[in-house]
Amino acid sequence: MMRVQFVTDVTSGYAVIALMGPRSRTLLRELTPEDLSSAAFPFGASRESNLVMPVSGQRE
């Protein structure tokens, strides 16, 4: 049986905000109860979370 799959470009529905610097985690801790420690959210990791709305976060 042949399987048909489709790919839909949804990039126009997303925006990127880069939050960087020595106090970035301190600021984010005020906006989310998520554990943002290096052990729980290591370099190169990404996860779904919720600030005021659902967000995708990536640590680089």
Image: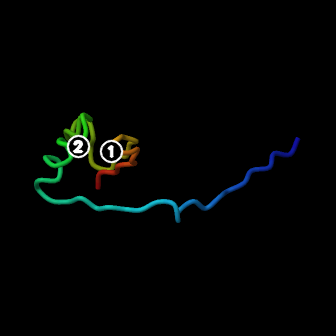
Task: Give the quarter of the figure containing the N terminus.
Answer: top right
Query: Mark 1–mark 2 contact, CB under 8 Å?
Result: yes
- Residue 21, which numbered label? none
Q: Kindly give the residue lying farthest to the front in the view shown.
A: 52
Q: Residue at x 72, y 54 (%)?
A: 6
Task: Give the quarter of the figure containing the C terminus.
Answer: bottom left
Q: Is 25 situated left or right of 14 in this image?
A: left
Q: Earlier in the sequence, mark 1 or mark 2?
A: 2
- Amino acid type for the residue under numbered disc 1: Val
Quarter residue 19 falls in: bottom left
Question: Which residue matches tag 1?
Answer: 52
Near-viewer residue (22 or 31): 31
Task: Kindly state the secondary structure of the residue where label 1 is placed.
Answer: loop
Give the alpha-carbon distance from disc 1 to disc 2, as whole Å. 8 Å
Q: Kindly give the residue lying farthest to the right in the view shown.
A: 1
Task: Kindly state the secondary structure of the residue where label 2 is placed.
Answer: loop
Crowd around label 1: few <14 · some 14–19 · many ≥20 (10 Å)? few
Question: Which residue matches tag 2?
Answer: 31
Q: Position of residue 3 (x, y in %)?
A: 81, 45
Seen in the picture, residue 12 relative to 57 is either above or below; the reply is below
Q: Residue at x 39, y 48 (%)?
A: 56
Q: Is 51 situated left or right of 15 in this image?
A: left
- Amino acid type for the residue under numbered disc 2: Leu
Quarter residue 18 falls in: bottom left
Q: Residue at x 35, y 41 (%)?
A: 50
Crowd around label 2: few <14 · some 14–19 · many ≥20 (10 Å)? few
Near-viewer residue (45 or 11): 11
Q: Position of residue 23 (x, y in %)?
A: 11, 53
Q: Position of residue 58 (x, y in %)?
A: 34, 51
Q: Residue at x 20, y 41 (%)?
A: 38
